[in-house]
Image: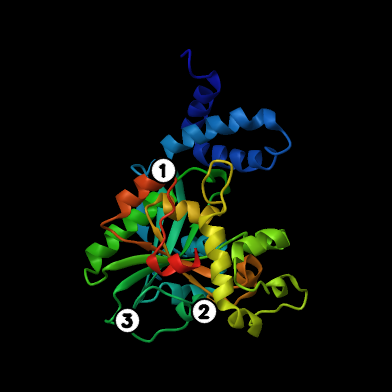
Amino acid sequence: QTAEGKRRELFRRMNMAPNGTSIIVTLREDLLKYLNESKDLIPLDNDLRHLFRAWFNPGFLKLEKITWNTKAAVLEKIMKYERVHHIKDMNELKRRLGEDRRFFSYFHPALEDEPIIFVQVALTNGLGKSIQELMKPSTKNDKKNDTATFYSISNCQEGLSRVTLGNFLIKRVVYEIQEELPHIKNFGTLSPIPGFAQWFSYLEENKLKTIMGDIKNDLSFLKSSDLKIGDRRIIENKEKIIKLVAHYLVNEKNQKGLPVNDVTRFHLGNGAVIEDIIVNANVSETGFKRSFGVMVNYLYELKSIEKNHEDYMSNKKVAFSYNLKKYL
């Protein structure tokens, strides 16, 4: 009673009312809009996050496999909530629910038909290297598939941002896929690099020279106004771009000494390894705006996930593959 303020008890009582959970989640969604200008509200946000971690504990959440037979109301919300790779129409959604795909979502008993967070998986032969390839129609399930490539994970409720759910979802989905498809032995992602293009736009010439070292620095074209999707200069300078992205992912740190990129922090925190950097992996307008079309393969090696997680959390160690060593 002494250590905890009365506000948390107030929210607990509100949570017992009809639709209480939904209203409090929406309240935090509104609150987040004002945090930057009203620092006095931060303790209120901390209280809500503390409560949400208990209320949305994975032990209370129900994992469901999403298929074409899932309720129409849920499918419509999934189209609306997809944050990473926009779903244009029902035909595209049907493709993402095909035989060579798996789609899982967490639901909370107090929020009926409201996805909390969902993940999309492609069954591939080796880790996927192109979003456009993954989205192509497929006639039959390829029996040669040996890998589950996670290519999209979306938090559906803005009010639950910074309430960690994704790491539990990925580990649970790995287990589900192993149970259903024992021939799938490898697990990894094809992930975006949000913020990379913006970071590069502010990068000073001297720092760029330091990063590139002895390699002749001629990446200024990435800042030019005539740069377009599919620009041949991107492929011509592929090795240099990979070196720059590798530096950004591994060496650029925030105030806490962790990678500056939030997707990188998420996967390393889950025990993944930065496996590969792929140029022209997403040749869409969104992919180009985020990172000039570059994406990352993070690999989840089941035998070393726990060790990688411990090294990252305790020593801030960024795990990357032997393939990327030459760029660093």
Q: Are marks 3 and 2 in contact (CB under 8 Å)?
A: no
Q: Is residue 320 above or below residue 2?
A: below
Q: Quick one: label 3, few (<14), some, or many (20+) residues within 10 Å?
A: few
- Disc 1: which residue: 315
- Give 148 or 207, whichever is nearer the viewer: 207
Q: CA distance from mark 2 to mark 1?
A: 37 Å
- Give 296 or 24, whichever is nearer the viewer: 296
Q: Is residue 81 visible?
A: no
Mark 2 secondary-structure assignment:
helix
Mark 3 secondary-structure assignment:
loop
The amino acid beneath tag 2 is: Gln
Res 255 → quadrant: top right
Front disc: 1 or 3: 1
Q: Quick one: label 1, few (<14), some, or many (20+) residues within 10 Å?
A: few
Give the mark nearest the N terminus, 1 or 3.
3
Along the horizontal axis of the image, is 33 left or right of 145? right
Mark 1 secondary-structure assignment:
helix
Q: Which mark is residue 132?
A: 2
The amino acid beneath tag 1 is: Asn
Q: Residue at x 48, y 28 (%)?
A: 12
Q: CA distance from mark 1 to mark 3?
A: 42 Å
Give the mark nearest the N terminus, 2 or 1.
2
- Give 189 or 240, whichever is nearer the viewer: 240
Across and down, in percent, residue 170 comes to 37, 56
Q: Residue at x 41, y 72 (%)?
A: 97
Across and down, in percent, residue 116 comes to 47, 51
